[in-house]
Amino acid sequence: MDTYHFSLIDPERDRQASFTLMRELRPHLADADTFAAQIVRQAGQGYRLLGAWQSEQLMGLAGYRLQENLLYGRFLYVDDLVVAAEGRSQGVGGRLIDALREEAKQQNCAHLVLDTALGNALAQRFYFHQGLLSKGLHFSQALQVP
């Protein structure tokens, strides 16, 4: 089995590698500097970005935050999960989910929660395989900001 190590992403040190990989999931991201600034802003709201490294190559990212609500109690919410094309079907995504589960347990969270697009059948199959179950639909509305 390939050896991976996991560490939180430093937006300065890991800027280019994390931006390049995150663009596979979020192609609308404009540039590495804007991405790093947003990661820093989101960190102020509790966002963390976990990297899966194989030697010096970034193979996967998981962005998450700890939250609490009346539905789940204390939970870990996964905002972003992406694996480099060459790391897919190599167990990287499953290892990231395992690392997030462990973090959730260490933080006394009752649930691990994430959303995925209705049309993303490959991700849905992966999540079911990881033991996550579909619990509902996520609704949103774009708003015009003044």
Image (tube, grey):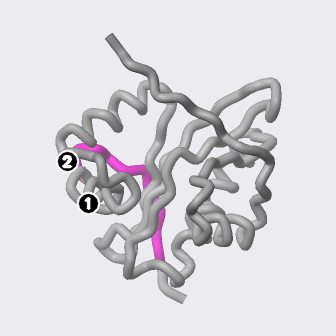
Residue 54: horizontal and vertical position, in percent? 39, 76
Residue 35: horizontal and vertical position, in percent? 27, 42
Q: Secondary structure at mark 1?
A: helix
Q: Residue 137, relative to residue 118: is it above or below?
A: above
Disc ID at residue 29: none
The residue depicted at 38 percent of the width and 81 percent of the height is 86
Q: Residue 129, relative to residue 12: is it above or below?
A: below
What are the residue bounds of the magenta stretch?
4-13
- Image quarter (top left, top right, bottom left or bottom right) of the C terminus: top left
Q: Give the labeled residue for mark 1.
A: 20
Query: Crowding at label 2, few (<14), some or many (≥20) Cα neighbours within 10 Å?
Result: many
Q: Residue 121, relative to residue 110: is it above or below?
A: below
Q: Amino acid at mark 2?
A: Ala
- Image quarter (top left, top right, bottom left or bottom right) of the N terminus: bottom right
Name of the residue lying farthest toward the bottom? 1
Query: Crowding at label 1, few (<14), some or many (≥20) Cα neighbours within 10 Å?
Result: some
Residue 63: horizontal and vertical position, in percent? 48, 48
